[in-house]
Image (cartoon, grey):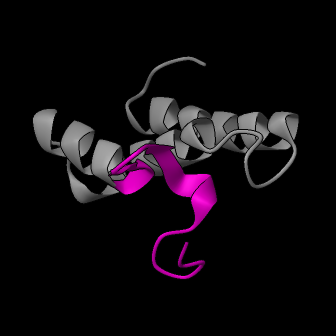
Amino acid sequence: MDDVNKPNHYMIAPGIEAIDVIEAVVSYFQLNAHEGYLLGNFLKYRLRAGDKDDLQKDIDKSNVYRGKLRAYRGQED
């Protein structure tokens, strides 16, 4: 596997990468750039959780972006 262009920790299933899921979700919900960035990072860390870094570390990182997205939208966490 190509560690730069297609790292294993971003492969969700054969032929499906985390970026594919992120692009589909952001497009479906028609998010602005900032929301897309925040949701994309949330999804990135959740989808790779435990495959690159420690599972809890990835979950914690995703929760940071979840909180930032909720704050941006004026929602309580």
Asked whether, in this view, residue 12 is left or right of residue 3, the answer is: left
Residue 3 is covered by the magenta coloring? yes
Position of residue 7 measured from the top left corner of the image (x, y, whole percent) = 57, 67
- Residue 49 in percent (x, y) is at 69, 39
Quadrant of the drawing holding the C terminus: top right
| Bounds of the magenta segment | 1-19
User: Is residue 70 left or right of 31 when viewed as pictured?
Assistant: right
Frontmost residue, 19 versus 11? 11
Instruction: Write the residue at 55% across / 38% down.
Output: 47
Residue 67 sits in quarter: top right
Viewer-proximal residue among 71 and 65 = 65
Residue found at x 20% / y 42%: 24
State yes or no: residue 43 in magenta. no
- Where is residue 44? Give x, y as percent: 52, 48
Q: Residue at x 50, y 51 (%)?
A: 11
Q: Quadrant of the N terminus?
A: bottom right
Q: Where on the picture, by quarter, is residue 61? A: top right
| Residue 66 in the figure: left or right of residue 52 | left
- Compared with 77, 36 (above or below) is below
Q: Tell which residue pokes out farthest to the top in this image.
A: 76
- Observer-nearest residue: 65 or 3? 3
Q: Would residue 38 be found to the left or right of residue 49 on screen? A: left
Q: What is the number of callouts on the image?
A: 0
